[in-house]
Amino acid sequence: MVACPYGVRTFFSDYPESYYPEVGASEYEKVKYPAFIKGTVKGCDFCMDRVADGKKPACVAACINEARFFGDLDNPESYVNKLIADQLDISVRTVEVHRARVFDKMEVKSAVELANLLRQR
């Protein structure tokens, strides 16, 4: 755990109850917490089991303020790319062109490759 450069691993010395015990467990906590085993280490896997079934990761689905987003940055027509374009007040095509230029300069072919490259630096 000490060697984790991303800070996403968590050691469960005890069963977590809730972030806010006074209001009870959120929908995310109800889904995920029972899977945690005392004395183990857990890291986020973006709920790949849910994503494989066409669902959003649990933290995205349960976020009542809709402050979390999940999608395919490599797909120009994805919801997240449309959000980026809307926030920057540019077209989706412009987002695509800028991304292609970054990929070309960094010599990568996808957002995953870019993320992996940046983690190594």
Image (cartoon, rainbow, N blue to C red):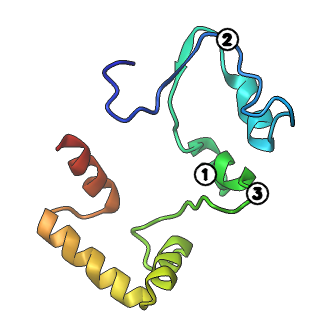
Q: Observer-nearest residue: 49 or 87?
A: 87
Task: Report the disc number at residue 51.
Answer: 1
- 20 lies above or below 103: above
Report the residue at 28% width, 84% height from top.
Answer: 97
Report the residue at 72% width, 61% height from top.
Answer: 65
Q: CA separation, marks 3 and 1? A: 19 Å
Q: Quadrant of residue 20?
A: top right
Q: Observer-nearest residue: 106 or 55?
A: 106
Furthest-right residue in view?
23
Circles 2 and 3: CB atoms closer than 8 Å: no
Label 2 Cα crowd, 10 Å radius (few <14 / some 14-19 / many 20+):
few
Report the residue at 33% width, 54% height from top.
Answer: 112
- Which part of the image, by quadrant, shows the N terminus? top left
Left or right of residue 1, residue 67 in this image: right
Residue type at mark 3 is Ile
- 30 lies above or below 64: above
> Element at badge 1?
helix
- 97 lies above or below 121: below
Q: Identify the residue under disc 2.
A: 14
Furthest-front residue in view?
22
Task: Report the disc number at residue 72.
Answer: none
Q: CA separation, marks 2 and 3? A: 27 Å
Q: CA separation, marks 1 and 2? A: 28 Å
Residue 79: horizontal and vertical position, in percent? 56, 74
Mark 1 vs 2, N-terminal side: 2
Label 3 Cα crowd, 10 Å radius (few <14 / some 14-19 / many 20+):
few
Q: Identify the residue under disc 3.
A: 64
> Element at badge 2?
loop
